[in-house]
Amino acid sequence: MTDPSPLPLPASPPGRRTVLLAGLGCALTACSTPRPNTPTGPSISSSNSAAAFPSPAAWQPGPGELQPDVKLRAVQVVEAIGGWPPGGQGVAAARARVAALGADPGLADQGGPLLADAPQAALEVVYAQYGGLLADSASVLVTCRQWLAGPDGAPVSTGSTVDVRLSSAEPRWRVTSLHPSDPGPAAAALPDPALRVLAQPRIALPPAAVADVRSGQVHAAALEAMLALAGAYAFEVSVLRSGHPLLVFGTDRPSDHPRGLAFDTWRIEGHPVVDPAAPAGLVESFMRAAAAAGSYNVGGPQLLSGGRTANQFFSDPTHHDHVHTGFRD
């Protein structure tokens, strides 16, 4: 579920930029299909030449999306901030790229970890999911992976999820604020369910969600449910804790996500939840399996009957593009 944060999330501390480049050391290798928990993007070689740097395609909404231009606007601002050619680093350059879109250049100041101090960067959007969709406002959760040029010029893999807020306007919706994910430091030791989720090849986690699990702040109930679902489905998580609104969007109710008590799934067995061409019954069966795995609150594009409680299943425009699976503490 989703929630508007009343205050912008704080940007990363200045020292994080240096730590980010020093601590992320593995260059990516070419791969034809994404691997869970170490997602790959455009094929690159081990060469340090400029030609080897990733060049991901711009994200485009697929079939079945509600108000696709709202998502596209959110994504374009994130792509403009988080990717730059050699020598294009820095807030001033990011402001110019955002202004070229006709958006508020001050949004670049809210880029946080997207603006690491690297001479070159590439950004690929994994998926843009609604965190909230109302008549005049929206939250779009832009899940992305990013490559930063390291000291030797070779690309270093990282990524984040950005909660992008928008308000209705003509001719296009207007981006009003950005709230990048902040998973926190990795825990010194992880419980067994967390280790099993990170090792499970049928659960694909984007970079921010991997960091959430490694932080030790994802509840065991959510982790065990993911493992149970992986017995029958290969699926891709969009959002766990960080990068999600703090409140259920448009309400004053706390969301389960920031407390590590929920996860959202955007693709099941290779089929986006939003895609009308997905096999009949696939999303429904996944939702029912999530309920059987212990979720008290399963949301998706279909309103299902037969839950253990009157509101175990729910549906609304926000959850047209993903399955929400929530748990009680």
Image (cartoon, rainbow, N blue to C red):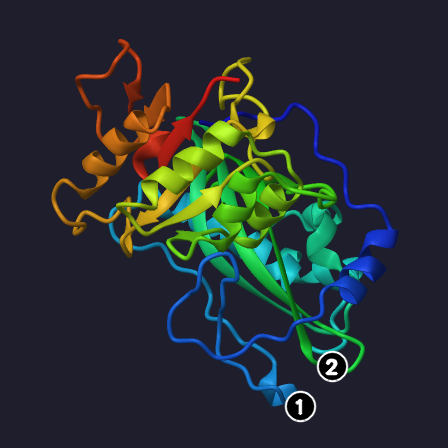
Horizontally, residue 199 falls left or right of residue 312, namely: right
Q: Earlier in the sequence, mark 2 or mark 1?
A: 1
Residue at position x 73%, y 48% in the image: 112
Q: Residue furthest right?
A: 15
- Residue at the outermost left position: 280
41 w.r.t. 323: above or below: below
Q: Secondary structure at mark 2?
A: loop
Task: Name the kind of residue labelled 2 in the image.
Answer: Gly
Q: Residue at x 57, y 54 (%)?
A: 207
Amino acid, disc 1: Ser
Tell me if I can see residue 310 in this picture: yes
Q: Quadrant of residue 119?
A: bottom right
Seen in the picture, residue 179 relative to 49 is either above or below; the reply is: above
Q: Secondary structure at mark 1?
A: loop
Is disc 1 surrounded by few (<14), some (14 to 19) or many (20+) residues within 10 Å? few
Q: Position of residue 129 (x, y in %)?
A: 43, 43
Question: Which x, y percent locates residue 293?
Answer: 34, 29
The one nearer the camera, 105 or 288, is 288
- In the image shown, does 245 or 90 lie closer to the viewer? 245
Mark 2 surroundings: few (<14), some (14-19) or many (≥20) residues within 10 A: some
Q: Are marks 2 and 1 in contact (CB under 8 Å)?
A: yes
| Mark 1 lies on residue | 49
Whole-angstrom CA distance, mark 2 to mark 1, is 8 Å
Q: Is residue 301 visible?
A: no
Q: Residue at x 14, y 40 (%)?
A: 281
In the picture of the structure, the residue carrying the numbered disc 2 is: 153
Farthest-out residue, top: 310
Front-lying residue, 189 or 292: 189
Q: Position of residue 99 (x, y in %)?
A: 65, 56
Is 59 placed left or right of 257 in the picture?
A: left
